[in-house]
């Protein structure tokens, strides 16, 4: 039996049956406006990443370096997936309607800011981060840094909600969400560390060193960000099986352990290659 969120909760979690088109339509009609906005925004951001993958292919530019279409591709795809995931999994958290709406709205706006700033600089053929060459470049770079700080604050708030009140959902969803948010925070902290180090080196006249300083932490940052999508999706897929609740929870915990091992390996790589 699925652990459903009480009637007083701001959301209704779908059951474990395979969704049919009519059920999906009913679900979409029941989605709140802020969720629709977030889902639509996530699709646009993900689409932007795909479009710029085509631009990269057509242009034939390098995948490496501070000036590359790579950032427009990876940030569009990554932020699109993350916004989609956070909007979906927040429906399992026991938080108030207004609080959730505000957090999701701010998160969506911040995702757009990050992707737009990076994409703009990619088209201008200048670095997006740690670029203080002109007043405009400085404004973009600092806006991205501030936006990154806001992302940490919003996702930390959702993480606290996941750990302080047991999330709803099918068996295995609660440990999936808690492990996902815990690993996500590692990714956010590694991103904050990259920004802080890069800004410091840029401010002290070592801009080239600022770009290279982020390399060791990039694998850790990239791997950690998407546990909050992978693990809950696994829990949801397991809900479609005939496995017992105990088996599903055990499978989620095993997957979380494997994911944590991958994060630990990325952390060791960051330390060794520093």
Image (spheres, helix red, strand yellow):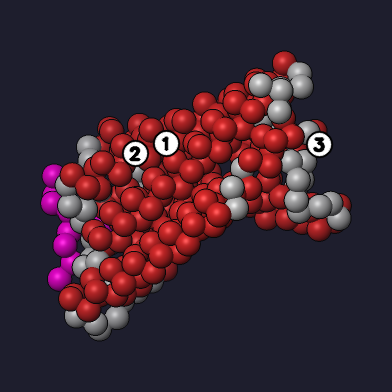
Name the secondary structure under disc 3.
loop
Work out which residue is located at the far front of the displayed protein and give it: 272
Q: CA distance from mark 2 to mark 3?
A: 33 Å
Depth check: give the residue in front, 3 or 33: 3
Q: Earlier in the sequence, mark 2 or mark 3?
A: 3
Q: Earlier in the sequence, mark 3 or mark 1?
A: 3
Instruction: Tell me where residue 79 appears, x and y as whole percent.
Output: 54, 47
Asked if disc 2 and disc 3 are in contact, CB closer than 8 Å, the reply is: no
Instruction: Tell me where residue 59 appears, x and y as whole percent.
Output: 86, 52
Is 253 drawn above or below residue 97 in the view shown? Answer: below
208 relative position to 35: left or right: right
Name the secondary structure under disc 1.
helix
Instruction: Kindly identify the residue that appears in the image at 50 percent across and 37 percent down.
Output: 193
Instruction: Kindly identify the residue that appears in the image at 34 percent across and 67 percent down.
Output: 257
Q: CA distance from mark 3 to mark 1?
A: 28 Å
Q: Quadrant of residue 153?
A: top left
Instruction: Tell me where residue 58 appears, x and y as whole percent.
Output: 85, 56
Work out which residue is located at the far top of the displayed protein and give it: 135
Name the secondary structure under disc 2.
helix
Q: CA distance from mark 1 to mark 2?
A: 6 Å
Asked if disc 1 and disc 2 are in contact, CB closer than 8 Å, the reply is: yes
Query: What residue sits right under mark 1 in the picture?
Result: 152
Which residues fall within the magenta stretch?
Answer: 1-13
Instruction: Kindly identify the residue that appears in the image at 17 percent across and 52 percent down.
Output: 166
* Disc number placed over residue 156 in the picture, else none: 2
Work out which residue is located at the far right of the displayed protein and give it: 59
102 relative position to 220: left or right: left
Q: What main secondary structure does the magenta stretch of the protein show?
A: loop
Query: What residue sits right under mark 3 in the picture?
Result: 125
Instruction: Kindly identify the residue that appears in the image at 30 percent across and 50 percent down.
Output: 91
């Amino acid at each position: 039996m699925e652990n459903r969120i009480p009637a007083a909760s701001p959301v209704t979690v779908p059951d474990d049956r395979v969704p049919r088109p009519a059920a999906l339509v009913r679900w979409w009609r029941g989605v709140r406006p802020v969720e629709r906005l977030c889902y639509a925004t996530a699709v646009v951001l993900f689409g932007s990443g795909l479009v710029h993958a085509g631009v990269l292919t057509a242009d034939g530019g390098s995948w490496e370096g501070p000036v590359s279409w790579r950032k427009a591709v990876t940030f569009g795809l990554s932020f699109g997936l993350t916004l989609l995931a956070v909007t979906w999994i927040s429906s399992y958290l026991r938080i108030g309607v207004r609080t959730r709406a505000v957090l999701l709205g701010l998160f969506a706006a911040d995702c757009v800011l990050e992707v737009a700033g990076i994409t703009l600089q990619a088209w201008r053929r200048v670095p997006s981060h740690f670029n203080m060459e002109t007043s405009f470049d400085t404004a973009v770079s600092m806006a991205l840094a501030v936006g990154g700080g806001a992302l940490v604050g919003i996702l930390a708030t959702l993480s606290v909600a996941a750990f302080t009140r047991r999330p709803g959902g099918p068996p295995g969803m609660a440990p999936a969400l808690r492990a996902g948010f815990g690993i996500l925070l590692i990714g956010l902290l590694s991103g904050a560390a990259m920004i802080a180090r890069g800004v410091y080196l840029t401010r002290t006249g070592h801009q080239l060193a600022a770009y290279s300083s982020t390399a060791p932490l990039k694998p850790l940052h990239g791997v950690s960000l998407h546990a909050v999508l992978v693990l809950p999706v696994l829990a949801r897929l397991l809900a479609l099986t005939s496995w017992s609740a105990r088996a599903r929870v055990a499978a989620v915990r095993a997957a979380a352990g494997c994911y944590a091992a991958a994060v630990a390996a990325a952390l060791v790589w960051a330390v060794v290659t520093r």
